[in-house]
Amino acid sequence: MSIRLELETVAARAAGALSRAVGRGGGTTLPGKLLWKVDPAAVDALSSRLGAGVALVSATNGKTTTTSMVAEILGARHELAWNRAGANLMSGVASALVAARRGADFGLFEVDEGALPEALERTRPSAVLLGNLFRDQLDRYGELEIVAERWRAATARLPESTTLVVNADDPVVADLASGRSRVLRFGLDDPRYARSGLQHAADSKYCVRCGTPYAFAAAYVGHLGDYTCPSCGHARPPLDVAARDVELQGLVSSRFRISAPQGELEVRLALPGLYNVYNAVAAASLSLAVGASLEDVRAGLERFNAAFGRFERIATDGKSVVLLLVKNPAGANEVVRTLETGVPPVLVIALNDAIADGQDVSWIWDVDFEPLLDRVGHVLATGRRAAELGLRLVYGGLPQDRLEVVPSLEEALDRGLGLVDAGVELVVLPTYTAMLELRAILAERGAVRPYWEEARR
Amino acid sequence: MRIRVGHLYPDYLNIYADRGNIAVLSRRAALRGHELEVSAIGHGQPLDPGAFDLLYVGGGQDREQALIAPDLVTKGNAIREAQERGVAMLAVCGGYQLLGRGYRAGDGSVLPGAGLFAHETVAGETRMIGDVLLECELDPGEKRLLAGFENHAGRTLLDPGATALGRVVHGFGNDGKSGLEGCRLGSAVGTYLHGPLLPRNPWLADWLLSRALAHATGGAPPVLAELPDTLETEAFRVSAERARRRGGRR
């Protein structure tokens, strides 16, 4: 390591510690922000020191969970440089590199969709996992097609030695791997869990080649599924790694079988929902692509229990709160589907509109909340845009006498806890900053550790 | 009374929660004892200018807009005829652009529009994104505020003599310069504001319903019964406050 790089990383680490010491939150991105500003090429140099290579993960939905699963799998054999707290811009990658232990030999980074091209260029990964593209916070990311175009240009520049691990069920993402030699394609193969039709907010439903609407033999999550273009024949490619025989167990867990070139694997996952089956098969594929064994994959997935705030059970005052992050229509629709099997008596939905949530809150109208609304006992709409959310629910058919609009997150949390009986979980669906605030409130009560402590576990 | 709504290309143009606008029209009609009958008008389906009391065109991503634009041009005559008959219309974002003469892209190519509104849209270098607050005067002497969210790269330039929907109080508006937003032609309204627009601006929903009822009955626009609108007022207040604080800033 050059003396300059050495000095820069030491200074950056010190800044992170200082940020925590003065109580300015986690300091998870400050060291990287500094380093990134002073010397962006330091990311290239620090990445190249990781002897076993670097893997990147990007997607609209599931980045943090999928990356955490991969970390659980690869952690058995590698010392990881990993952006565990989900800071996924280049500064977050830089921070993880700075904070990595001396012996770190493998880099594992989740990367924001917009930051992917730069991350590919600087970290020169041996494998890249591309999970899915959904419409997401259009005020921040722009239209799906703009992100897709950047990904096309960036992946076209990758050397042939890089393995692309792509979701075959997403036509736009799968197409990025066409014509490449080192490719692993994963997907879901269990038509019993197909939705009856495409949902309102389904995105890439027109053929990437000719623009004709796809015919879907099965649509699993949003537009992800088994598609064929009736006009030009463009279709889902054969799956190298597939999840089959899925059994979803309510808000608790799931079981499924993974078929891979290396063999078959029965997995029990301590996470609910079909979207987490997608995350698991994606994580399995990337891990296999970088040399993990089937047994590593099984053991890692079975050990795994949730990335922070994505699906978290927190005990407080003898009651239990379940946080399920919602941030865009496709993700929220899957959370709704997971809740449908056992509609909770009390539901808290928290809508903030900071930059990290999306300042444009129109996405809540693209979410199909309706299956819950005639069965849920009581809904608390909270957060800075509580009234807007309340309108969405009322116009969606929720009787007004079952709705309470309580903008203060803390008041809504307490009201919710007061309404649920002992032994019943309070289900909370927060947007990103609402999730952070709720965790902070619970941390203050001693119910949960702050996320940066967790991240340094 | 039955109010017949034609929703143009709901499969393609639905990016900024357009179904929220339809849900608001539907519920507010029902609360006054009217029934909204919504029909989808898809790609390749003919549009009968006499068959609807209200037409709705939403926004789409660029790819979807390009896929339906040629079809929309073929419906141009029917749309203009419907407007002349007094059919109420709401066009949002991409739909608003496509009801003009056309969209000129960065490379000079032109995507022709339906030619209802007297405007042309030119691609800009940057996107204009953020909360917006407008002051409108749809009926003489009645000034009302509209709060929404805009996200567009196109600069829409109104022809001299064309009427804007409103004056920008906070935000960018049609082109970020003129201080004007949207376009209004009789009972037809086009705007960049989504969010969606109508839940937090119920007065505009009622204005459109009243115009649609006038078309349905052949009479004057009726005055609709007041609704409590408590949540609507609060949602408007927060949205307007956002526009004051952060509109037109990027």
Image (spheres, grey):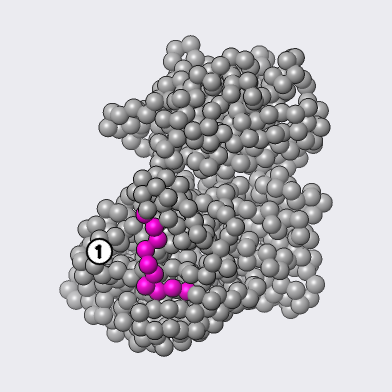
Residue A342 visible in this rendered orientation of the protein: yes
- Front position in the image: A53 or A50: A53
Percent from the top left, x then y, of residue A232? 36, 49
Majority SS type along the magenta span: loop
Q: Is residue B10 magenta?
A: no
Percent from the top left, x then y, of residue B69? 43, 31
Q: Is residue B201 above or below residue B217?
A: below
Q: Which residue is mark 1?
A: A180
**Residue located at (43% from left, 78% from top):** A259
Q: Is residue A236 magenta?
A: yes
Give the quadrant of the N terminus of chain A. Answer: bottom left
Q: Is residue A106 left or right of residue B146?
A: left
Residue at mark 1: chain: A
Looking at numbered disc 1 in the image, what kind of residue is underneath it? Arg
Q: Is residue A38 above or below residue B191?
A: below
Q: Is residue A26 left or right of residue A127?
A: right
- Front position in the image: B70 or A3: B70
Task: Specify start and end residues of the magenta stretch as a single range.
Answer: A234-243
**Residue located at (49% from left, 35% from top):** B43
**Residue located at (27% from left, 32% from top):** B107
**Residue located at (53% from left, 76% from top):** A245
Q: Is residue B189 left or right of residue A159?
A: right
Percent from the top left, x then y, of residue A238? 37, 67
Residue A5 visible in this rendered orientation of the protein: no
Percent from the top left, x then y, of residue A336? 63, 61
Q: Is residue A282 above or below residue B10?
A: below
Q: Residue furthest left?
A: A2
Query: How packed is label 1: few (under 14 Cα within 10 Å), some, or many (20 or more)?
Result: some
